[in-house]
Every structure is written in structure tokens, then in C-alpha cells.
């Protein structure tokens, strides 16, 4: 495992995941719900920024590695899944939305693994659609964790609309990847 700045940022993201979850298990005598919301949102926001920053730095510093390419999407999926489970438990996200997003992540991860095993990983490489999906998911989750109104704006409602939009983009990107993979599946059956 190469020890470089991009990989350290990915590890930081992984370490932040249980902390974001644990915040909501702290006793109310330590932090009230508003403080928990703000702290969880800040930590999730830091983790989301490291998602962009580690890839950027890996390219700019020429520190890309096979291990980093493996670990980065694992960290992203763990972060999203953990946050969605917390948000479902807090009744801020509908379980159907979480199932759509988590189901897509599992499906596309398995598809990518299989496509790599048959030498066709390029057909399911990360697309612009996937990047938009991720951006909407991260922003929606951040707002849903924050949960507080700001300047009269109902952040929960905005986050809810964004997570629904993210789930639509999630389905759309899954269909995109599956359509790209079908010719390879037919060719290798």
C-alpha cells in the first residue's frame, strides 16, 4: 500500500465514517440534537471534500496507485451507505430511497468487478453521469444530516428533494452502465 497524501485522505474519509454515525449515539447530556446535526454534517462535509481532493491530488502529484483506485470507491460507498442508514433511522430519508441508492452501488460494484475479470473494465469506467449522481448524493446527505433551517430555508425539504433527484440519477446511471456492459456480457457468455 503506497503511503501518499491521496491515500491518507481516503483513509481519513474511512475513519470519519464511524464518527459521523457515533455522533447520533452520544448521550443528550453531552450534545443536543441540533449540535449532533451540525457536527455530523461538518464531518460528512469534510469527508465529501476529501473524496474530490484525493482524486485531484493523485492526478496532480502523479500519485495514482492501484491500491488508491481500489480504496477510493470503497470509502465512498461506505460513507454513503453509513449515512443513509443513519438518516433512515432518524426518519429523514425514506427506506425506498436508501434501498435504491445502496442497491445500485452494490450492483455497479459487482458489475465493475465482473467486467474487470473479463478484461472489459473500460466499458463501465466512471462517467460524467456517475460524477453528477455522486455530487447530488453527497449534497443531499449533507443537508439531511444538517437538518436545521438556515435563513428561513427548510434545509430538510431541500435535502429531501435532492435525495429524490439523486435517486433518479442513481437509477439513470445504473441503466447507463448496464447498457454499456450488455455487449460485453453477450460477447463473453
Image (cartoon, rainbow, N blue to C red):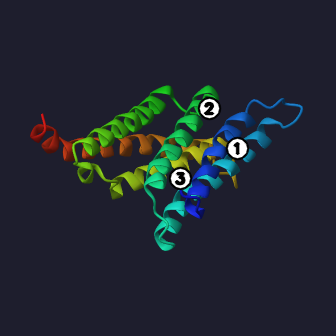
Instruction: From the viewer's perspective, tell me whether residue 12 is left or right of residue 174.
Output: right
Is 32 above or below relative to 132?
above
Mark identifier at residue 40? 1
Label 1–label 2 contact, CB within 8 A = yes
Mark 2 sits on what residue?
Answer: 86
Dot 3 surroundings within 10 Å: few (below 14), some, or many (20 or more)?
few
Whichever of labels 3 and 1 marks the residue nearer the N terminus, that label is: 3
Whichever of labels 2 and 3 marks the residue nearer the N terminus, that label is: 3
Is 9 above or below relative to 30?
below
The quarter in which the C terminus is drawn is top left
Could you tell me which residue is drawn at 72 percent across and 42 percent down? 37
Whichever of labels 1 and 2 marks the residue nearer the N terminus, that label is: 1
Q: Secondary structure at mark 1?
A: helix
Residue 33 screen position, x and y as percent: 78, 36
Could you tell me which residue is drawn at 66 percent across and 45 percent down? 15
Q: Count up the numbered dots.
A: 3
Dot 1 surroundings within 10 Å: few (below 14), some, or many (20 or more)?
many
Could you tell me which residue is drawn at 65 percent across and 55 percent down? 46
Residue 10 screen position, x and y as percent: 57, 53
Residue sticking out furthest to the left = 187
Mark 3 sits on what residue?
Answer: 1
Q: Nearer the viewer, residue 161 or 29?
A: 29
Amino acid at each position: 500500500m503506497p503511503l501518499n497524501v491521496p491515500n491518507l485522505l481516503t483513509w481519513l474519509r474511512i475513519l470519519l465514517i464511524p464518527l459521523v454515525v457515533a455522533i447520533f449515539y452520544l448521550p443528550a447530556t453531552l450534545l443536543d440534537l441540533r449540535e449532533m446535526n451540525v457536527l455530523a454534517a461538518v464531518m460528512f462535509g469534510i469527508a465529501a471534500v476529501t473524496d474530490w481532493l484525493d482524486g485531484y491530488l493523485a492526478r496532480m502529484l502523479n500519485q495514482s496507485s492501484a491500491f488508491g483506485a481500489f480504496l477510493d470507491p470503497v470509502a465512498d460507498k461506505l460513507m454513503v451507505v453509513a449515512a443513509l442508514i443513519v438518516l433512515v433511522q432518524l426518519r429523514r430519508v425514506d427506506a425506498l430511497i436508501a434501498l435504491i441508492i445502496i442497491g445500485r452501488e452494490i450492483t455497479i460494484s459487482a458489475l465493475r468487478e465482473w467486467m474487470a475479470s473479463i478484461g472489459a473494465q473500460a466499458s463501465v469506467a466512471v462517467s460524467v453521469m456517475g460524477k453528477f449522481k455522486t455530487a447530488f448524493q453527497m449534497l443531499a446527505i449533507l443537508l439531511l444530516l444538517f437538518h436545521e433551517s438556515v435563513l428561513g430555508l427548510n434545509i430538510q425539504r431541500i435535502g429531501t428533494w435532492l435525495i429524490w433527484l439523486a435517486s433518479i440519477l442513481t437509477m439513470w446511471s445504473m441503466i447507463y452502465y448496464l447498457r454499456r456492459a450488455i455487449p460485453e456480457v453477450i460477447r463473453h457468455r
